[in-house]
Amino acid sequence: MKKLMMAAGGGAILGLIATTQIAGPLLAQDATGGATVYEQLDLFGDIFERIRSQYVEEVDETALIEAAINGMLTSLDPHSSYLSPADAADMREQTRGEFGGLGIEVTQEEGWVKVVSPMDGTPADAAGIMSGDLITAVDGESVMGLTLDQAVELMRGPVGSEIVITVFREGTPEPFDVSIIRDTIKLTAVRARTEGETVVLRITTFSDQTFPDLQKGLQEQIDAAGGMDHVNGVIIDLRNNPGGLLNQAIYVSDAFLDAGEIVSTRGRNPAEGERYNAQPGDLAEGKPIVVLINGGSASASEIVAGALQDHRRAIIVGTKSFGKGSVQTVMPLQGDGAMRLTTARYYTPSGRSIQALGIQPDIIVEQPMPNPDANADAEATPQFRSEADLRGRLDNDSLTEDEIRQIEEERARTEATAALRLEDYQMAYAIDILRGLSALAPQQ
């Protein structure tokens, strides 16, 4: 049976990515249960008939059955659910990296909708939605008591339409409203750039395009730098990446590993467990790697971080990841619907499950909250004069013009990284780590 496996964040995306694999149609139930099961099914049929015939208002029979199915699935765990034909079509569209919505990955926590992460360049990201935010109401309607899918449905709407969500954020005294304009979400899976001598690969999602985009982007940056000899390392930025296709997480991990296990999955039947191993070849050619994660890094992101951490191939920097260590299988049903069922846990190469625990960084680096007075504080910092500022100073006659130029270029890079701290402290920290490792590396 051909399977397409996915590993995503907390549960649903507004236009939804879910930790998933695709299985064959589910057409019949196992008939090996005892009489008690049939008695319970008779009870269900009796209740359904009474609701249909005696409820105070006429009911939609299809919606009633779908609600019963979804209730059965959602009682299992936060990631199992029923997908209507429309939802199943949306999910297939999202794995291709384009969909309509707000651009946030959400899960459910104590009745509220919790943001796992906003996606780069989406309406939610532009509106300032943050990982960990709790959505308590949509257009003034409370989400308490709704299933996750019902809450997501409330947030769907035509592209270009406005939605007002009420957000509670830790550290704020009261919930506040955020206005967002729905848009078509076109995700760029990987954005590559170079900071000084460091190649930065920002992976926003694990869709069909992730590995091809990573491979192409990395090579373009290496070529622009004049070859790998001019690159001191690679930063893989997985912050606020909610996950996606499991096979893409495996490809990305394999890209930087020469051998060894990447991830394993274990379901109810131990014999059906699977292991995925790396093939020879390292796109970074052994250069040091730093992986950035935070609380919005989930599932497929955690697979990559865990694999590179366990093989000591990368230094993990940032804050603890989300902690979603389960795999869902999407099973097509009659009528073009589907059900998403948790069927396995995944394990990092060392055999650890990160379910509800997350990946712990090797170096914990918090991202400071924006400080509007930062520039004012910088201006107030006293500026000290150096020997070079003194009148009549002696010139340095021990360096050639090329050596002086190299020193000036290095100083410029260092100052650029220092300036980056005001914008992205975690990224600047990662760049400093690679610069330090480069300085300690033996000269060729």
Image (cartoon, grey):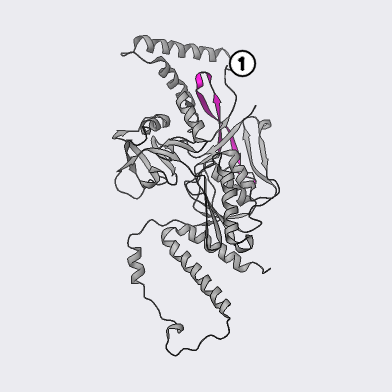
Q: Position of residue 394 (x, y in %)?
A: 49, 89
Q: Residue at 60% of width from left, 39% of height from top?
A: 247
Is 156 placed left or right of 4 in the picture?
A: left
- In the rendered structure, which segment of residues is drawn in magenta? 326-352
Q: Position of residue 60 (x, y in %)?
A: 38, 16
Of 140 and 213, the residue lying toward us? 213
Residue 49: in magenta span = no
Q: Residue at 58% of width from left, 84% of height from top?
A: 398
> Mostly what secondary structure, the magenta segment?
strand
Q: Quadrant of the C terminus?
A: bottom right
113 to 383, vertically: above or below: above
Q: Position of residue 210 (x, y in %)?
A: 56, 43
Q: Quadrant of the N terminus?
A: top right
137 to 284, vertically: above or below: above
149 to 437, vertically: above or below: above
Of 332 and 82, the residue lying toward us? 332
Secondary structure at badge 1 equals loop
Q: Position of residue 358 (x, y in %)?
A: 53, 46
Residue 337: in magenta span = yes
* Residue corresponding to mark 1: 32
11 to 24, vertically: above or below: below
Snapshot quadrant of residue 250 = top right
Snapshot quadrant of residue 109 = top left
- Which amino acid lies under the numbered mark 1 shown in the image of this protein? Thr
